[in-house]
C-alpha cells in the first residue's frame, strides 16, 4: 500500500511554521532569516576558495574562485548588516503571499471540475493576495506590522490549504499536484 503526501500539505505545514514564527518574533525572525541566507552564501564560497588554495600547489590548473570570493563577500554583508535587506525580504515575502493566493484560486478553479466549490472559498485566497500586495506596496512603513500581517496571513493560508487538501484530495486525480513518498510496509 502506498500513501502520498501532497505538495498542498507540505506547503500548508511550511506556511504554518513560517506564519507562527513571524507572529511570535517578527523582527528577530527576519534578521535571523537574512543571517541564515548569508551563511548559505558563505559556506559554498569558503569551500570553493579553500579548495582553490589547497589545490593550488598541485599540477592541475584551477581558475581563480571569483564566484567563491563574491559569495563570501555577499554572505558577510548579509550576516553583518541584515537590516539592509529587511525591505527586500519583506517584498519577497509579500510576493510569496501573492503567488500563494493565486495558486489557491487556481487550485479551487481546478477543483470545480470534480466538485462544487462555494464562492466563499475564494474569499480567503483573495485576501491573501491583497495582504501580499499591501506588504509589497509599503515594505518600510512598519516592517514588524508588515511581517505580522504576513505571519497572520501565512497561518490563514496554511489553515485554508489544509482544509482544501483534506476536502478535495479525495476527488483529485493522482497525477495532479501530488508527491508520493512510499511509507508502506511491503518491503518486509
Image (cartoon, helix red, strand yellow):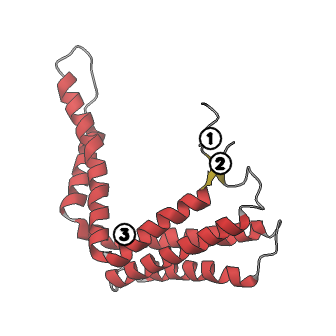
Residue 92 x, y percent position in the rendering: 43, 68
Q: Quick one: quadrant of the C terminus?
A: top right
Residue 153 versus residue 142: which sits nearer the camera? 153
Residue 66 versus residue 112: which sits nearer the camera? 112
Query: Helix, strand, or loop for circle 1?
Result: loop
Quarter of the image where one finds residue 10: bottom right
Horizontal relation, residue 183 to residue 134: left or right: right
User: Is the C-beta separation of discs 1 and 2 under 8 Å?
Assistant: yes
Query: Helix, strand, or loop for circle 2?
Result: loop
Q: Quick one: quadrant of the N terminus?
A: top right
Determine whether 184 is above or below 75 in the image. above
Q: Earlier in the sequence, mark 1 or mark 2?
A: 2
Residue 165 x, y percent position in the rendering: 65, 65
Which residue extends farthest front?
Answer: 188
Which residue extends farthest top?
Answer: 59
Q: How crowded is mark 1: few (under 14 residues within 10 Å), some or many (20 or more)?
A: few
Amino acid at each position: 500500500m502506498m500513501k502520498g503526501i501532497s505538495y498542498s500539505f507540505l506547503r500548508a505545514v511550511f506556511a504554518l511554521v513560517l506564519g507562527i514564527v513571524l507572529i511570535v518574533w517578527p523582527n528577530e525572525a527576519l534578521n535571523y532569516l537574512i543571517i541564515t541566507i548569508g551563511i548559505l552564501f558563505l559556506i559554498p564560497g569558503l569551500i570553493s576558495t579553500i579548495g582553490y588554495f589547497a589545490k593550488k600547489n598541485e599540477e592541475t590548473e584551477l581558475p581563480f574562485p571569483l564566484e567563491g570570493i563574491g559569495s563570501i563577500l555577499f554572505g558577510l554583508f548579509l550576516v553583518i548588516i541584515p537590516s539592509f535587506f529587511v525591505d527586500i525580504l519583506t517584498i519577497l515575502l509579500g510576493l510569496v503571499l501573492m503567488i500563494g493566493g493565486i495558486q489557491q484560486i487556481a487550485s479551487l478553479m481546478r477543483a470545480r471540475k470534480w466538485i462544487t466549490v462555494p464562492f466563499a472559498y475564494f474569499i480567503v485566497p483573495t485576501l491573501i493576495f491583497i495582504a501580499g500586495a499591501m506588504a509589497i506596496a509599503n515594505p518600510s512603513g512598519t516592517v514588524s506590522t508588515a511581517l505580522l500581517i504576513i505571519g497572520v496571513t501565512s497561518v490563514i493560508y496554511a489553515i485554508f490549504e489544509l482544509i482544501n487538501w483534506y476536502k478535495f484530495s479525495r476527488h483529485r486525480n493522482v497525477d495532479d499536484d501530488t508527491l508520493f513518498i512510499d511509507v508502506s510496509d511491503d518491503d518486509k
